Amino acid sequence: MVAEAVTISGWFVSSVFNKLRDGALSYYKGQKSWQSGMKADLDRLASFQPQIENIIYMAERGHLPRDPNLPIYKWLAQLQDAVEEADNVLDELEYRHLKGEKKIVKLASRAAQQDDLLKRLMEIVKTFNDLVTGLDTFAQVLRWFDQRFATEVRGDVSQETGFLFTGNNFFGREEEEKLIIDWLTSSDTKEISVFSIVGVGGVGKTVLAQHIYEKLDYFETKIWVCVSQTFDEKTIAKKILKSLLTDKELKIETISEAQRALIETLSAKKFFLVLDNVWNDKEKGKWEKLIAPLRYGGEGSKVLLTTRMESVSDMVAEVVGESKISLNLNGLGERESMLLFEKSAFLGYDPNDYPKLQSIGNEIVTKLSGIPLAVKTIGGMLNDKLDDEFWTCILEDGALNSDKEMDGIMEAIRLSYEHPPPELKPCFRYCSLFPQNHKFNKEQLVDMWISVGLIPEGEEREEKVASNFFETLMRKSFFEPKESYYTMHDLLHELAQFLSKNECLCVVSDNPIQIEQNIRHLSLRTSNIYVLKNLSGLKFLRTLLLYCHIEDHELGDVICTALKGFKTLRYLGLSSKHLRDFPESIGNLVHLRALSITRTQIPKLSPCVCILYHLQILEFTSNPYFDHSKGSIPSNIYKLSKLKKLYLPSNVISMVHHIGKLTSLQQLIGYSVGDEVGYDISELEMMVELREMLLTNLENVKSTEEASKAKLYSKQHLQHIALIWGHGFANTGGRDESHKEVADCLQPHPKVVDLVLNGYSSTNPPYWLEARILLNLTQIKLAYCNLERLPPLGQLPSLKHLFLENMAALKKIGLEFYRSSQSEDPFPALETLELIHLIQLEEWTENTRSEKWFPHLKRLLVLNCPNLTKLPSIPTSLEELELNSLEIVTLPDFKYQNEGSSTNQGPRFLSSLIIFGCSNLVSLSSGFFSHPEQLTSLKELAIWNCNELVRLPSKGFRELVNLKSLRIQGCKFFLLPMFVPKNFFPPSIQRVMLSSCEDFVASLPQLLCNLSLITLLKLEDCSNLISLPSENVLRCLTSLREVKLRNCKRLNSLGGLGVISSLKILVIKTCPMLTTGSPMDSIEESPRNRLSMTLDVLDIDRAEYLFVVPLRNLHFTKSVEIRGFNSMTRFPDQWLQQNGASLRSLGLYGLNSVESFPDSLQNLTSLKMLVLHNAFRLARLPELPESLEILDIDGCNKELAERLKDGGLDFDKVRDLDLGVFGVSTRH
């Protein structure tokens, strides 16, 4: 690549030229300047417009020479500047019109030459004419525009919609995958080990790592961190913590705090960490700071990293202190490359139907070096044009014939950029505004494209066009879809950065920087106010994303001053957690289409936003300091007639007076219908552009006439509707038949796809739910409704998800629920059905009129229906079933298409089954459990609180051959020996959790027999459990890693637990009878007493447990937490010493009675972290081991705290430690 992309867009130039002529004609036709020559100049410009468009057309398609020094590139840049200036002037003319100055020239008719806009317009026309004169210079360029290019069919993006590329393709890495998985699962005794996947960009390093990460369920904890080129150890540590502590807010300012948090979180846990896309091969110190806390993980913890550089692998191996373990990932083989290519290029078509294209494709693939990204992107480029000539043209393109592998890959990817329609290219380049590995939100990105003018204007809505663009880019593999966001491969991001280097800039810097004056789109993240002070002179800027987390009293003024210089802005995103004042200079940004102010301390929205008449998107959220009074929203906000999206803090939208004047608004979420003029439901009448709406407090609608004014039936774009009486909570007002009268007048348009009806108090449904009107409805939720019967929802052909919740008056689901006629099968598309808190429901009638019984249902949840004693048959398509708090006596059976062949038509898809709180359920030997051969896909089974359950399936659960997880809780008689057959559990079982099953004790040895794959055994509230099984039983549990014993009040022996060499985590809580062992000093130390077991974590709530066999014989424990020392006054020194060589982390909690520790604590030569809790009687610290790095004391007396201060008696002991002292008390 020798030239960056041409950033000017042909459609934009044409649009501006047309608007320029029309705008000048409209505003200045009566002026002398118009008569004296401007009209002639514009006519001359119009005559050259086709030639200008031809040159741009060539540039957009890459048909110009790639020498950036050619004069034509300078000419194109000058043209772009002139076109954008013309767009600004025309935009300001429209702004004046929107402001109310409809006849501007009349206001200055005596001195029109003083009109600044007229002067600028005249200068622009002159500039265009100078550029037109220069066209003669490019006559030779025009001759290059040969017939082939002239007749090329322009891409029609509108025909490329409707298909989403929904996942990664994984081909031909079986050997590499096995090698890495074998390494990951090897019985490694190292504290941490690292494996590096090394390869060129796009070869598939990340995809291979992702595939292994998702597939492997071997480790206690898995973490994925994308590192990228900026290597900051604190940032990486915080990412790891954020992955582990998803429900906690991280307040970490220093690397020491990050290290401490990592040690506490990962201590003795066997983890799998992926560091993706690592570049740092020089800063060894940063690597050491990152690796240090990871060493506290459990034995066998592994790190897998991906990198383009072998030197990174060398560096990490040196830091970890091991020989380098790496895999150099090469390209795919020919067969696998061709499979991937065909999947991308033929996309829904059979490649065998196109033998010639297959042959050409094979030749293309051989030139791509087996690089998956190149194969996918080239395939994606070809998939909308299955034409021999086009494919041959791509085959012969020089980009596929580079001798240098990496250059060839980048050229191939560049080629995939050149061929899509030119309208897509600016949208792709714009993505370089975000950092590498950014999680793209489709809606936000689409809004940004529209706001800054990247989407062509036409008959279709801009939102639809932009959405189509995004989907096209995704289909061509420029975006990768994830669960709730999208990513872009780092090579594609690099390409976007290269192509847009004179257009877009993403900066993360605390040092003042020099920014090119012609930059159009800027993202800046800084913590230095001087960076903001130097931000000026960017007269072409159209996007500014400003993230400035600066605590400085000047911040507001500096931002306000900086924004004054950016008068051409279309999109402004501002996030600054210390910003307290609204930057009033925003009111001067007359071109602004989108304003997003988030995470600030600004209490009110400034009235200055009300004069931003072009504004389409306004976001003012994530602000805990927002003033929720009515004065916080300016009264004139309704003047923003072009506003499409308004995001405000919760419930604030209802404060907008006369919101109905925002006729362009597309979303209205959380609007509380009032009973005053300006806040009532009639405000909806003219809001015809709504796409999504949630209304509350509909009880304030007093009449059908008032409801009719909303005109919901005429809003054809409104697809998502929530109608809520009250605030969506329990309806305590009883029946109110007026709700039906109002609801009848709130009939949605037939195109609605998602409907919520909440708090509806009438006994009969609205008529439009009874009739076949909402044929496009895909989801409906009826909650807190007073309905006595359900509408015939089975007649809705598109319905996929149905939720019925808290309907207190519903006693029967009858045949009327399924359909209103006999001609069609009910619920032909339903996938999810949830019945929740239907407390009066007594009967659910099965539909016998149709052979098809919920033919596509995947998830069924029936929760808290305490009067429901019988369920209808279960559909065979089901994947998830949960029966919760029902009064059923037996389980339902399956509903088969043909009753005579039930043995081979069962629900082989059912993978999750939960039965909870069915207190009358007696037997599992009937119903669907009588066909265990049809439950072969079942992986998760949980049976909770079914107290009367006594009858098991005749063969137990052993025929559930894929069962992985079993939880049985609160079933007292379920596991009695007389009911438990031999080999009760299938050998596939990995997790067994038994709780509150009092009489299963005698069955436990039989239950655990031959479970060689079990990794977790959890026994809770087992009041009759006296001892764990013997060595003979437990010896076969060769994969058991974790045992948890809680609240087993009579347990006095751990049985043969000591023989389980694979055990890594042992938790024992509230087992008081387990403390009757002999003191440590009565046990003779001998090799035969020494256990080979190496515990990563021992977590107990009584120190006395350490006297119990086999715990007293432990010698290799890594992390110990003891919560509660009871009446002990000294820590058991002998046990501590015998584990001293391996002990790395020690947490002692509840030390209320402990007065001292032995100085032999210093002999724990591996101890890194010590936590002391409630040590209020501790008078002094003992001598500490030299290996100690972190000491936390949470709760101590004042005297000890003084000794630990600088100059105190114990300060020398803690001088070099990371010390934390909290909860100092004067009482002890």
Image: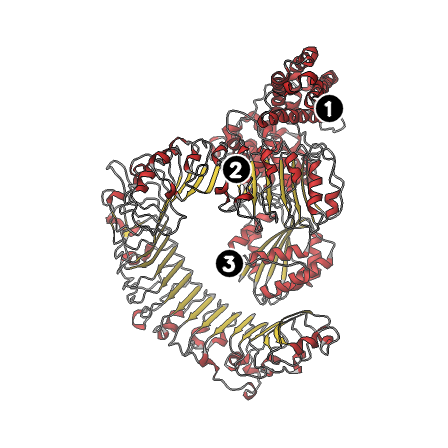
Residue receiving disc 3? 217
Q: Amino acid at mark 2?
A: Lys
Closer to us: mark 2 or mark 3?
2
Which of marks 3 and 2 precedes in the sequence? 3
**Left or right: residue 1029 compared with residue 334:** left
The residue that label 2 is drawn on is: 645
Q: Name the residue at 46% across, 75% down.
A: 1070
- Label at residue 616: none
Residue 396 image position (x, y, % from top left) = 63, 29
What's the residue at 52%, 44% (across, down)? 630
Q: Is residue 439 left or right of residue 1049?
A: right
Answer yes or no: do the residues labelled 3 and 1 have beta carbons within 8 Å? no
State the quadrant of the N terminus. top right
Q: Amino acid at mark 1?
A: Trp
Q: Mark 3 or 1, which is nearer the eye?
A: 1
Which residue is nearer to you in this view: 909 or 635? 635
Circle 1 is placed at which residue position? Answer: 75
Between the C-alphas of marks 3 and 1, the distance is: 59 Å
Disc 3 residue type (three-letter): Asp
Q: Position of residue 990 (x, y in %)?
A: 44, 63
- Which residue is outermost to the bottom? 1082
Identify the element where label 3 is drawn.
loop
Q: Alpha-carbon neighbours of circle 3 within 10 Å: few (<14), some, or many (≥20)?
A: few
Does residue 817 show up?
Answer: yes
Mark pair 2, 1: CA separation: 38 Å
Return the residue nearer the eye: 68 or 810: 810
